[in-house]
Amino acid sequence: MSDTLSLQAQPRVEAVRAPSRRRRLSEGARSERRLGWALCSPAAVIMLAVTAYPLAYAVYLSLERYDLRFPRQSHFVGYANYQAVLTSGFWWHDFLVTVVITAASVSIEFILGMVFALMMHRTIVGRNALRTAILIPYGIVTVVAAFSWQYAWTPATGYLAGLLPSSAAPLTNTWQAVGIIILAEVWKTTPFMALLLLAGLALVPNDLLNAAKMDGASAWQRFVRITLPLMKPAILVAVLFRTLDAFRIFDNIYILTQGAHGTGSVSILGYDNLFEALNLGIGSAISVLIFIAVGIIAFVMIRGFGTAVPGSENL
Amino acid sequence: MTRLLRRVRVWGARRLLASVAGLALLSPLLASCGGSAGASSGPVVLNFYNFPDPSGAVQTAANDCSARSHGRYRIIYQKLPTSADGQREQLVRRLAAHDDTMDILGLDVTWEAEFAEAHWIVPWTGRYKQEAERGTLPGPLKTAIWKGQLVAVPYNSNTQLLWYRNDLVPHPPRTWAQMLQVAEHLARQGKPHYIEIQGAQYEGITVWFNTLVASAGGSILNASSTAPRLGRPALKALQIMADLAHSPAADPSLANQQEDQNRLAMEAGTAAFELNYPFVYPSMKADKPQLFKHFKWTLYPRVDPSRLAAVTIGGIDLAISAYSRHRSLAFQAALCLRDRHNQLLAAVEGGLPPTLESIYAHPTKSFVAEYPFYKEIAYELRTASVRPKTPAYQNVSIVISHLLSPPSGIRPRQTLQAMRAQLVNALQDKGLIP
């Protein structure tokens, strides 16, 4: 709590200082500022080298006709690659699949994560054992987990496929396979959601809950009226992180279906165009569009949650 | 804290701090750019990038050729990833960066056009070309030619046979129609009856389609690879695939099956037929000795009773990188790596069919023991078809596999129309691949 308070305090201090900023700084303050710059510049340089440069280069490539296989045909094409992507049925299909996976997996994870978080928060007996048990899926490498799901759902070899009618091969049907992908995602990342929400639960003061109890609020009322509003920052962080992660889903699909039978996400589409077709122009355009989509999601969510953003003026 | 900072300032190094830290972090990168140049008085090092061979035959051949060069070169065998896509990805990344430490490249037979068109590999001319062509089977040789030039040398080949159980099928079928009939008959009797073939959404189903189209007397692309050809042979091929998918002969997992799932299904005893590469033979021998007694092989079934089947061939060709600093030595080393002695070794140890006519014409004892089906293989390699030859093969294959898998979704006429339209785009490298 004190951390958030000090974070809030800073902008105010700045605001007070702002009018007098042009005043000459003392020698000590100036050299301290220089040291500050010197100390953080290596990090800044490296951040620029590893993020800003590739990003700018991807934007540049997305405006080029650039196929590794036809290096001599490379030339500037403006927005033609974006036009090709945005008018392609493959992009919109994969976009839909991605949105479905994101929406379904994040909402299921949120509800399950909340249940798990409450369990971890409230349990008194065997608390450590419970927390460990809940966190196990998160500790397993995604690719390994995806392979076990894949084998489990393959007819003749898998125990889960064995529960289905003998002619069923769910991984070859678009929406059944998407369902399995969502299941694999939920299984894998619910613990992460639960962990973040647990941190949020710790923010809720017990006195407040006890006071509400004294006033006759039911357990549900206490949860909806007190716990949830106070957890808003934690919920925002958890849902935002998971939404951005889910929107960029790659590994589970890559192992489970390789994006076959219409189960590809936008990331799989980008990968296939970059590394299978070696079409850097189209592939970069897809990557930039994913980046923009992620940016929009983050913007809308932070706006939607409004003042609940950690570090903002009011909680 | 501030006292400490002041002390730091006293050291006077603060202005340099940033640049020094930056350099320190970059130094490993700079060092790695230096490469392994330097005083080398020993033999020239030739890097041979090839598929990872678990049998050890490739390594033995590399050692053997290095020894035979009498100190002129030393071949270092660099293992590529296991999957074909992974191999291509690594080769392409290095070649696109003009990596001059790559000399001999083991290319899958579908990459020659792409690599040659991008000027990543050099054509074979003069005496190297003559030696590469001498005694090489025509089928595999076709895979190494692009725009009339020999751009690689066939290293090994591969082709599918029809494997069947003679306890269920005393007389193997000669055509697809007969095979379907037999399978349906077995199904009615309640006996194992599946036909195992590659129906998953990957390149294997493109190969199946290519074989059927070629066996029906057609081709997927025109002779100059500029446009789709398809036509009636393609319609016939689609009809056969759809017929199989809707018959009781289809494995329920057809749309999910690659070569290895086919092998497992055959070994599990649920199938009567299997269309697959010869690796299934030693595997059946080791895994199911009882079934192995009835595990027989014959030529790939025909589409048209009066026309030989033209089975799509696979395999590896060796090419020389355009960025190699030792091209001449690399040509010599590549020829050595695929000479009779080393191909025989790779065939017996590694199970990969050779590309030299003489190995089949005058087989050694160990070759016959490992390859009891060598006559059928040689026969198919002579009448083989190759996959569509175009630098955009990857796009072409993806379009085809997406339209054909699951095979139960094939509607011959509509599928053919869609394929024609999408292939035009794929060949022009327009738009996205799915």
Image (tube, helix red, strand yellow):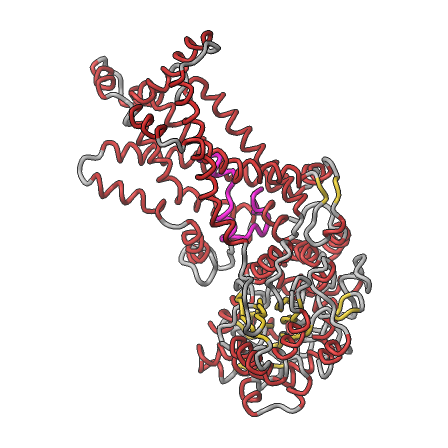
B124 relative to B258 in the view: left or right = right
Q: Is residue B426 magenta?
A: no
In the foreground, A227 or A217: A227
In the foreground, B214 or A15: A15
**Residue sitting at x 70%, y 56%:** B396
Q: Residue B159 location in percent, x, y? A: 64, 74
Q: Residue A225 location in percent, x, y? A: 33, 18
Q: Residue A194 location in percent, x, y? A: 34, 35
A121 relative to B368 in the view: left or right = left
The residue sitting at the left extreme is: A125
Quarter of the image for residue B177 reads: bottom right
**Residue sitting at x 49%, y 21%:** A303
Q: Residue B45 location in percent, x, y? A: 57, 70
| Quadrant into which the N terminus of chain B falls | top left
A170 relative to B308 in the view: left or right = left
Regarding residue A185, the answer to whether it shows in the image is: yes
Regarding residue B177, the answer to whether it shows in the image is: no
In the foreground, A304 or A183: A304
Quarter of the image for residue B410 reads: bottom right
Total residue callouts: 0
Q: Which span of residues is magenta-colored?
A: A242-268
Name above or below for residue B356 compared with residue B143: below
Name above or below for residue B365 compared with residue B382: below
Q: Is residue A254 magenta?
A: yes
**Residue sitting at x 62%, y 67%:** B103
